[in-house]
Image (tube, rainbow, N blue to C red):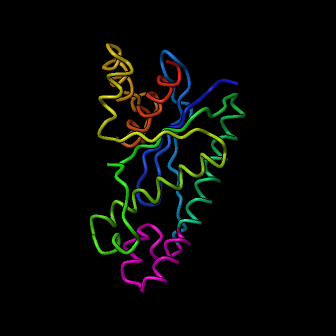
Amino acid sequence: MMRSTLGIRVHSGWGALVALAGDAVPEVIDRRRVEIIDPRTPGAAQPFHFAERLEINKAQAHVARCADVSKRMALEALRQVAGQLNRQGYTIASVAILLSSGRPLPSFEKILASHALIHAAEGEFFRQAFREAAEALKIPATGIRERELASKINTAFGKNAPGLQKRVAGLGRVLGPPWTLDQKLAALAAALVRAQAAS
């Protein structure tokens, strides 16, 4: 089996997933939008925003229910990706998840008291769903702060970094849409983790 790496850039309720294989010149072997919320559940896409209006026990219960659903859906999605890649002759060796600042969050009550922390908590909430799904499948997951991605690419690839970035940026012409910033950054994160594993 050939080894592949997944890169994921997370949004509220979904993630842009790109799978790479190949060493010297990474090749995109899969890409998809992965939904990890039940749209029929009120407040599922922004669980902390919704919980802000609730009494604390109900707020915690709402976030916990949403977390269970998101983790289950992320796990099922990664299982589907793994199964499809397996049929193509690939195994998933690692997952790269793009992070925001990565600062630890305070208590639940303090999160709900701050609009900025609510946004931070929701970002971490959905990243955690993907992280735990990878762990459940025994796939190593690496978090990469998005603002550090370019410098880490430069360090890992050296003089080849500009060529890699140009190639990834232009893949949309070959692959067709969607090839937005989400897919480009997910692909670069996957390429970085592949390079780090090979060094």
Quadrant including the N terminus: top right
Residue placed most toward the observer, 144 or 32 = 144
Say whether residue 157 is left or right of residue 126.
left
* 81 up-or-down from 54: above or below: above
The stretch drawn in magenta includes residue 171: no
* 157 up-or-down from 94: above or below: above
Q: Where is residue 124 in the image (x, y as percent from the top left)?
A: 42, 56
How many numbered marks, from 0 up? Answer: 0
Q: Position of residue 52 (x, y in %)?
A: 36, 78
Q: Residue at position x 62%, y 26% from top?
A: 3
Q: Residue at position x 54%, y 40% from top?
A: 141
* 82 up-or-down from 25: above or below: below
Residue placed most toward the observer, 79 or 105 = 105
Q: What stretch is highlighted in magenta?
A: 40-66
Residue placed most toward the observer, 119 or 165 = 119
Q: Residue at position x 34%, y 22% from top?
A: 155
Q: Position of residue 132 (x, y in %)?
A: 57, 52
Q: Residue furthest bottom?
A: 55
Say whether residue 192 is left or right of residue 95.
left
Q: Where is residue 142 in the image (x, y as percent from the top left)?
A: 49, 39
* 75 up-or-down from 42: above or below: above
